[in-house]
Image: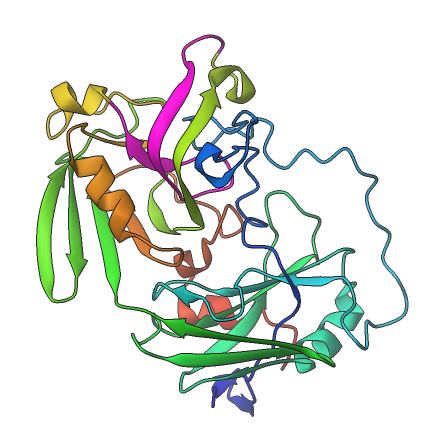
Amino acid sequence: MTTGRRGGRGRLARAWSAAAVCVLALAGCSAQALADGGGGTAGAGDRPNATGTAGATGKARPKPSATPPKSLAGAHINIADGQTVGVGMPISVTFDRPIPVAERADVERQLKVAADVEGSWGWVKDRNLLDGQRVDFRPRAYWKPGTAVTVRAGAGITRHFTVGRSLIATVDVRTHFMTLETAGSSRRVPITAGAPGMDTWNGTMVVSDKASKIFMDSKTVGYGDQYHDYYYYAVHLTTSGTYVHMNPKANTYGGRQNVTHGCVGLATGGPAKRFFDEVIPGDVVKVVNSRDTVAVGNGYGDWNLNWDQWRATSALD
């Protein structure tokens, strides 16, 4: 079972999380994966620190309620029942309305996780949601491969998932190489990252989803007509539009120079497809030697807080 301590006082860090499956809820990107049957355009562009159209809903902001959600109605979870995820995947529960500060401890008590891991819930200000609409469960360290997890949220909401093999990709924007470590093996792949002034986010990101073909429009992220085209083998990392994807520029600049609008580019002819085929949601992509660190709520940025900082985001003593 999950156990944890905070502030010198023991507390149960068991969690059971909520509800209707919404695998792309945190992706926030209006990118429509054509391979998944969609036919729309991708609102998120190459630039990682631009909002684009991602997360624009046009809905009125929900008002807090004075009544605690005893059954956690309107809760959604980011992991499907029976899914296999990577070692970095947090359990993320989002709500249709903001949870007031006074109700958050009560909500956490209704979230339970059964797994052999030390972990804690923490409230995250999601890039596309209001404060109080997202709470995540994160282990102290990455999940151990093979871990079986059961999540319950309130009455009648249950999810079972399994942690798969470990895959951790480290992108070094200074050397222009990505080191991929998985199943006891390691390999280096030439990359091109964000050009100066359009730097790729630094820090630890987690794969939220992927699509074999998406459409990106630079106008949605404030870059005019710089790009307006399909991109292939796109692995989604942040709500603001950071991807690892195939980029013909990597054929020339991979391993040599950073020339993208913020995404990580892989060469055609095999490297991009191989990476795309290997990764699953929850796999870790860590960018080093760049500039600003990605925000916790910009996708699954939970790992950019150390353990004490993460526990401090819980509403429980």
Q: Name the quadrant containing residue 116.
A: bottom left
Which residue occupies the foreground of this view, 127 or 70?
Answer: 70
Q: Position of residue 167 (x, y in %)?
A: 25, 59
Asked whether the viewer can see residue 144, the reply is yes
Which residue occupies the foreground of this view, 81 or 138?
Answer: 81
Look at 60% across and 55% down and name the residue there: 22
* Horizontal relation, residue 94 to residue 180: left or right: right
User: Of all residues shown, which one is farthest toward the right?
Assistant: 66
Number of callouts: 0
Look at 44% across and 29% down and name the residue there: 214
Which residue occupies the foreground of this view, 142 or 245?
Answer: 245
In reply to whether residue 239 is colored magenta, the answer given is yes
Asked whether the viewer can see residue 262, the reply is no
Q: Position of residue 111 (x, y in %)?
A: 64, 78
> In this picture, is 14 found above or below 245?
below
Look at 50% across and 88% down and name the residue there: 8
Q: Position of residue 197 (x, y in %)?
A: 35, 22
> In this picture, is 312 found above or below 56?
below
In reply to whether residue 277 is colored magenta, the answer given is no
The region drawn magenta spans 224-247
User: Of all residues shown, which one is farthest toward the front?
Assistant: 37
Question: Which colouring convention does the figure follow?
Answer: rainbow
* Horizontal relation, residue 241 to residue 111: left or right: left
> In this picture, is 305 found above or below 292?
below
Locate the C terminus by quadrant.
bottom right
Q: Position of residue 128 (x, y in %)?
A: 63, 43
Look at 24% across and 57% down and name the residue there: 168
* Horizontal relation, residue 66 to residue 282: left or right: right
